[in-house]
Image: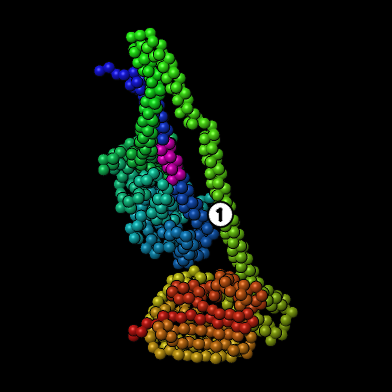
Amino acid sequence: MTLSLRRRITLTICSIIIFLLILLSGFIYTKSASILNQDAETYMQSQLERAQESIDLRIRIHQLETEKLALDARVLEFLKGYVSTSKMNTYLTTLMQKKNVQNKQYMDFFILNTEGIITTSTMPEAMYLDLSTREYFRQSVLTGQTITSDILIARSDESLIVITVSPICNNLGEVIAYAGTAIHAEFLSDTVKDLKLGKTGYFIIVDSNNLILSHPDKSLIATDATNTVFALPERLLSKEQWLQSDAAKKRIITNQNGFQELQLYKKMKSNRWVLIAMLPKYEVHEKSVDLLGYVILIGASVTLGAMLIGIYISNRISTPIVAITEYMNRAVKSNLMLRQSVSDSIKNLTEEDNLLNHETSPLLHPSDEIGNLSRSLKNLKDHFVSTISRFERESEELIKSSQELSSTIEDNSYRTGNFISTLSHDLKTSITLIKGYVKGISSDIIEDPAMQKHFLQEIYNSTIDIEKITCDILDSAYEAQWSQKLHLEAVDAVGFAEQLFEAANHYINHSERSFKGSFQCNSGCLLIDTIKIKRVWNNLLNNAVKFSKKGSLIQVMIAQHEEALTFKIIDTGIGIPDEEKEKIFDMFYRGQNLKTKGYGLGLFISRSILEAHNVSLNFYSEYQKGSTFWFSLPINREDL
């Protein structure tokens, strides 16, 4: 079968274009896939190093806390026999609770003697345990350094823990005991769980005993990694190999589902643990596969376009040639026909050329392209202007939020400083009085027994003041920290309300204020923490007396409304300015113009206690006219 000239030209042009496109697409895909795969492995290594640094940092912080415990003055006093075991246990418990405020990472603080026996601990069941055979204790004794253990099972509750011990030395540098801390193993798992590794990748920690220390599947923690895909090579577990290069090692493994996974493992710097990064191999090549799809799609589109262009070009090339050939064949019969044919062919060729120029010119007309470019630039400009305007608005909002946050921080700092200043002044006043009276007695100037007795009574009164200040601050601090923990009990509503009503009557009358009260409570019971509710009531009564003048009227109302019992205190005192109403429940906040003593904790603690009962503390106040505070407790109609 003979192809026409037009088809041969079309086929030739299309073949050349397709061949060049295939070569170009293959080259681009090969290079891009290589770069993407290399970037994926580089990304895994960078995430692995991030995870390693994060875990090493956590372990180092844990070791520093243990070393800090070893240098604690209280611990040294205990080892010298100045502090009893029970007091030391309490001190360690308090110290650990402070460390566990943000996260419950610590399980135990303890002290070992040089024989490896626990002599003091936060856990009674851990007292006098013998840890002398444990590897981490023996290593600490041998090296004199802080040592962190592999994963262990706690004897108390069989939870998974990691222990760190550090030597305690005397002034001569001799080891006299060992300080120890224990953290929950899952704390290390939480360190790497937020680090992303592709879509399904994850991190694993294996200790020197080939036990899994951290894994997304918590059921695998503390299991033996031997004969699993996480098993470490024996050469890596040897101490000799451990001291060599710590570069990340790569290997391809097949998981239990038959899929290949890329595994990178790297030695930890803080101890003989290994961090393993796991990522399915198909995720490593996922981007290159997506790229191949794009290359095929774009290549097919370009090939189709190339074929259309080839057909168009071949038509333009072959049309004049076909026309001349036909006219030449017809002109063979006569000279006239030959001349006419040549003339017509030339004319046709000219027309075809003009037609080609005429049809091509709109495509190349600069005005259309310039117009399109101008419109595109205008649209781009409008987009940029809109983006910049939105950015400016967001920046202004961010600056405003930052200023508000800064103002809040400064306000809190001021109130904290004011609290410390007030407390220091109160303590210093009493201490100064004590020093003055003691100096007067010790100088033998005061010989009158009555005057000496007066001085001693004043010293006693000052110590009572210091004790009251200390107890008040400690009680307030305890309530501020533990206000959310309630000991709920069902109490008779009538009896409990009568207690508070009578207490208010007695307190107000003995404070040289006028008492006016109303009581209306029929039946029911309250599910409350009675001690904390009484604390709220006493705080409100104390404020009503403190901020009102002698002889002024204070009203106390206890009334039952449907399913609630309302407690209300109304005073005719100085009231609260409007600008201070939003701040009165903040910790350490005191009015700007108040001359009364206080530490700014009463209302903060009261509201915290009531919120723990799912009850709100309400108030209404007019400046220089008085204030009203009230709260309502839900009543249970069932009998006690």
Which quadrant holds residue 288? top left
Q: Is residue 459 left or right of residue 81?
A: right
Q: Which one is nearer the viewer's eye here, 63 or 138?
A: 63
Q: Residue at x 57, y 71 (%)?
A: 582
Q: Is residue 334 visible?
A: yes
Q: Residue at x 42, y 50 (%)?
A: 194
Q: Quadrant of the C terminus?
A: bottom left
State which region is magenta.
37-51
Query: Secondary structure under badge 1?
Result: helix
Q: Residue at x 70, y 75 (%)?
A: 436
Rendered location of residue 535, percent (x, y)? 50, 79
Q: Is residue 597 left or right of residue 203?
A: right
Up-down: is 353 above or below 461?
above
Q: Is residue 22 visible?
A: no
Q: Is residue 55 left or right of residue 332?
A: right
Q: Residue at x 38, y 86 (%)?
A: 524
Q: Quadrant of the N terminus?
A: top left
- Density class for disc 1 (Cα within 10 Å; few <14, some 14-19, many ≥20) is few
Up-down: is 399 above or below 341?
below
Reading the image, the residue beneath label 1 is 394
Q: How many marks?
A: 1
Please identify the dominant SS of the magenta region.
helix
Instruction: Find out whether residue 126 is within the magenta segment.
Output: no
Q: Which one is nearer the viewer's eye here, 272 or 195?
A: 195
Amino acid type, mark 1: Glu
Rendered location of residue 230, percent (x, y)? 32, 42
